[in-house]
Amino acid sequence: GIGTTTPGFNLTTAGTQYTTGATYLGSTLEVMGNLRVNKGGYQLNLDQENPAQDAFIGHNARYSSGYVTASLKLKWGVSDNWFGSRGIVFSYADCISFFADTVAATADTEFTPTMRMIIGNNGNVGIGTTTPVYKLDVDGTVHLRGVADGTGLVVDSSGNVGIGTAGPGAKLD
């Protein structure tokens, strides 16, 4: 034990450690807490503040408070005029959500992430909405390339739209 008189493993340390050079592991790395990877100040954070529920992966953002997507609060990792943050929240209660912000940030100040896409536990995907009610629920303009096919509606590769026909012959058929 280093810094402890009651080591629980072959090597147990108490307090902060700093290692220069590479560290090699021959098996599993288990982190008892949160993991921060820091390269030039912009951190990649893996947090799980509530072991029974939510987990979080964030770039230039770290967990601050809240456990479900609607109440989640994060803190900026470093100050920047435009960089913002990106991340994924794994919410046991309702969904996997993806966020991205390109805004000015001040280190250690709290913010609510802007959720860009949600995959609900029911399988519904929301883009621009945090409450998708359909398999694909988009709030905003959609641009399709290629062929889109569905029950009653067909958009072919030339941009022709058919309602009730599988082979539209005009822009709207």
Image (cartoon, rainbow, N blue to C red):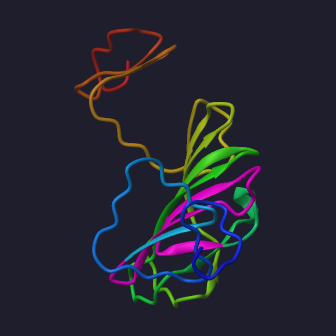
Name the residue located 43 percent from the left edge and 82 percent from the top edge: 18
Q: Is residue 150 left or right of residue 1?
A: left
Name the residue located 52 percent from the left edge and 89 percent from the top edge: 107
Position above or below: 78 against 53: below
Q: Quadrant of the C terminus?
A: top left
Position above or below: 145 against 173: below
Position above or below: 39 against 31: below
Q: Which residues are magenta?
A: 39-63
Tell me the chief SS of the magenta region.
Answer: strand
Name the residue located 40 percent from the left edge and 78 percent from the top edge: 42
Query: Does any portion of residue 100 appear in the rendered image?
Result: no
Query: Picture coordinates of residue 104 (x, y %)?
Result: 46, 86
Question: Could you say which is closer to the camera, residue 42 or residue 24?
Answer: 24
Query: Picture coordinates of residue 37 (x, y %)?
Result: 42, 71
Query: Does any portion of residue 96 appear in the rendered image?
Result: yes
Tally of numbered discs: 0
Quarter of the rendering containing residue 75: bottom right
Residue 40 lies in the magenta stretch = yes
Q: Is residue 69 left or right of residue 148?
A: right
Question: Could you say which is closer to the camera, residue 11 or residue 122?
Answer: 11
Query: Picture coordinates of residue 11 (x, y %)?
Result: 54, 66
Quarter of the rendering containing residue 40: bottom left
Quarter of the rendering containing residue 149: top left
Q: Is residue 121 left or right of residue 151?
A: right
Question: Could you say which is closer to the camera, residue 96 or residue 103?
Answer: 96
Q: Quadrant of the N terminus?
A: bottom right
Query: Picture coordinates of residue 27 (x, y %)?
Result: 42, 47
